Image: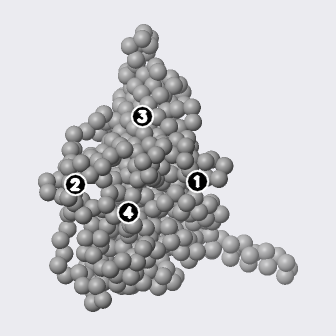
Amino acid sequence: MMEVNRRKFLMAATAASYARIQGANERLKIGVIGCGGMSTHHMGHLVRNKDNDNIDVIAVCDVYEKRLEAAAKLTGGQKFKEYKRLLENKDVDYVLIATPEHWHYQMSADAIDAGKHVYCEKPMTRYAEEAKKLAAKVKATPKIKFQVGVQGMSDDSYETARTYVDKGVLGKVVLAQIDYSRNHRDDFWVTTVDPDVKPGVNLDWNAFLGPAKKRPFDPDRFLHWRRYWDYSGGIAGDLFVHRVTRIIKALGLGFPERGVGAGGKFEFSNSKAEIPDTINILIDYPGGPTVQLVSSMASDHKIDHLLRGHKATLEFTSSGFVITPQRMFAQGAERIEHKKTGAEDVVLHHRNLQAAIRNGAALKCDAELGYKAVVAVELGNRSYRQRQYLAWDKTRERIVKA
């Protein structure tokens, strides 16, 4: 009798624990770490959808008090100046990490250790070595759901394209090309001016720097951190990661074989920015294809987003994609058009994570996909900075000289 009761108790305890971890039928409670512009975009959507999605933002954290106060006013969440104190809040089910890239690894690792599910803005980490360690940590913690914030993966075009690639409709894909370009008038990626920032008064500058090199306060580094290598991969880390993740998903790619990056500060040569205003990356995958990533911050003219196959070409469009047979294989072949479902949308991406937490739904951009994307963009960035061809050592999982 005692054994039966013990078994029932253990089963009940396990079920209760599982329900808590999954958040099944519960109101999921969210903590936000980093309350800048992108995070405010997230928070606005989360607040507007709190009843529909049965969620609530209950905690917010930032090293800059002005942003922290604004986030608390928007969400009603409890304020934290230190992210580790937020992670100690046992009511938080998952965290949104929307900080500069150099903090993504440590904050994500600490969140996992605290038993929190994670939505981490892209790129998953600043460096490939960090991505390797974080992907391994996520894999070793299967109850934790980890979503990388490449919200374009909540558009079904790329997973659907994969089905046609696998069926051989395109033949051998030899080249994929995609871009993310913008334009600026006087200087690039300078979008905010905030005269209220006062280190030591309302900003914890040392907490902002965190694992990065210790430097004197510089308002441009704080407000426009994407322009500096200490905190960001620049165009590649912030923009190409959106694009290469699409290609990796559509083609079912693993890790690259080798890559090269080229570019410079061609238009904004007097800018304080360390990163280039123009960069192009070519990445070879084992047996093909070559993936071409094109971008400039000084010209926003687009290129077609294509998977170039031997038998057909797939072009991604705003409504989905179109597959057009190559002329020499056109006889008996049909033009195929896919109308997408989903969208490049943070609401859908959060809902996907919420569904994963509640009922085990497959994540649209998990840690393994995030790892592959970080490797691709860092390969290009390091090649550009070192002015040499680089390769991926698949045995040691590290970038090396080609």
Residue 63 position, x and y percent, is: 35, 81
Residue drawn at x 57%, y 58% as measured from the top left: 132
- Residue 239, image x, y percentages: 34, 52
Q: Position of residue 279 (x, y in %)?
A: 33, 47
Which residue is the extreme one toward the left? 185
Rounded to the nearest angstrom, the CA distance separating label 2 from label 1 is 32 Å
- Name the mark nearer the viewer: 3 or 4: 4
Residue 309 placement, left or right of 273: right
> What is the spatial separation of the Cα atoms under label 1 and label 4, in whole angstroms?
19 Å
Which of the two labelled residues, at mark 3 and mark 1, occupies the earlier sequence position?
3
**Would you name the residue on which mark 1 appears?**
398
Q: What residue does disc 2 label? A: 269
Nearer to us of marks 3 and 1 is 1
Mark 3 residue crowding within 10 angstroms, few (<14) / some (14–19) / many (20+): many
Label 1's element? strand
Foreground: 179 or 142?
179
- The residue located at (41%, 62%) in the rendering is 121
Other-residue count near label 2 (Cα within 10 Å), few / some / many at <14 / 14–19 / ≥20: few
Q: Earlier in the sequence, mark 3 or mark 4?
A: 3
Q: Quadrant of residue 54?
A: bottom left
Residue type of the residue flagged with mark 1: Arg
2 vs 1, front mark: 2
